[in-house]
């Protein structure tokens, strides 16, 4: 009986081992870049009368998750899209037509909006517009902060430096959606799965053409 018990324990261990391996494979093979479907959708939301080119400026898996590094790559680059790819295979983020800067102030942009592109791996695109008077409080720039949208803050991605934890980044920011952006019945859970654990975070410059 002892021998059989040991065999069963070994089988259980191997079962858990391979389940873990499959999980890591699924996480590591998740697409962490904008697809053509994503850029087509974003382009329609930004300005349906134009096509847009999206050029990668900053990527935390490549450049490090650090606020000063973000500003070094993204300051004064014009319109940008920030994209978060979380560990639940959800893709969300935000667009701003304003220049990023680190002047510790809120920046006005009536055209800014938050987005959900995918939820749990399924395309569920929604746009959440800036509803503040005159577009105030759209984004917040500070040398110690990563990408921050709304002066509430609706979405504060991270502060300082965040190191990779295994296969993902446990961002130390926060989300209090609904202060500046109209969430249209959605919330932190239905857009971001209630957490900021991401496989990647990217910032793209956006250029429109007629």
Image (cartoon, helix red, strand yellow):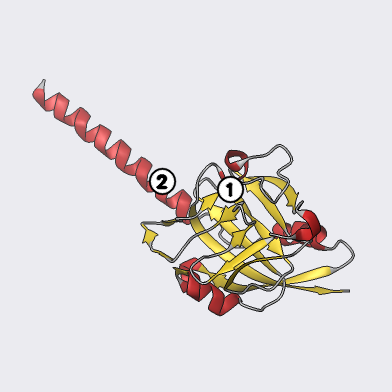
Q: Residue at x 80, y 62 (%)?
A: 46
Quadrant that contains the C terminus: bottom right
Q: Residues within 10 Å of mark 2 (few under 14, many from 20)?
A: few
- Work out whether mark 2 precedes mark 1 in sequence or the reverse, and give the earlier one: 2
SS of the residue under disc 2: helix
* Rendering coords of residue 52 (x, y %): 78, 70
Q: Position of residue 131 (x, y in %)?
A: 77, 51
Q: Residue furthest left?
A: 2
Residue 22's label in the rendered image is: 2
Give the residue at x 73% y 62%.
39
Tell me: residue 67, above or below residue 127.
below
Looking at the image, the residue that sits furthest to the top is 1
**Quadrant (top left/top right/bottom left/bottom right) for the N terminus:** top left
Residue 55 vs 154, above or below: the answer is below
Few, some or many residues within 10 Å of mark 1 (<14, 14–19, 20+): many
Q: Nearer the viewer, residue 61 or 75?
A: 75
Foreground of the two, 87 or 65? 65
Determine whether 205 is above or below 111 in the image.
below
* Disc 1: which residue: 90
Q: Residue at x 57, y 57 (%)?
A: 84
Q: CA distance from mark 2 to mark 1?
A: 19 Å
Q: Can you tell which quarter of the image residue 141 is in?
A: bottom right
């Amino acid at each position: 009986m002892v021998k059989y018990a040991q065999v069963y324990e070994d089988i259980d261990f191997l079962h858990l081992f391979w389940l873990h391996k499959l999980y890591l494979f699924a996480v590591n093979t998740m697409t962490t870049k904008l697809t053509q479907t994503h850029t087509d959708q974003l382009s329609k939301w930004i300005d349906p009368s134009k096509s847009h080119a999206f050029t990668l400026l900053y990527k935390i898996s490549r450049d490090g998750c650090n606020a000063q590094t973000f500003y070094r790559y993204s300051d004064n680059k014009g319109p940008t899209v920030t994209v978060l790819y979380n560990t639940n295979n959800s893709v969300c983020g935000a667009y701003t037509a304003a220049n990023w800067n680190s002047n510790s102030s809120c920046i006005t942009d009536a055209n800014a909006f938050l987005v959900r592109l995918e939820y749990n791996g399924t395309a569920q695109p929604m746009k959440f517009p800036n509803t503040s008077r005159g577009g105030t409080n759209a984004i917040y720039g500070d040398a110690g902060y990563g990408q921050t949208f709304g002066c509430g803050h609706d979405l504060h991605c991270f502060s300082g430096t965040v190191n990779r934890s295994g296969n993902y980044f446990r961002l130390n920011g926060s989300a209090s959606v609904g202060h500046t952006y109209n969430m249209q019945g959605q919330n932190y859970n239905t857009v971001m799965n209630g957490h900021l654990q991401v496989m990647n975070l990217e910032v793209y410059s956006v250029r429109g053409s007629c």
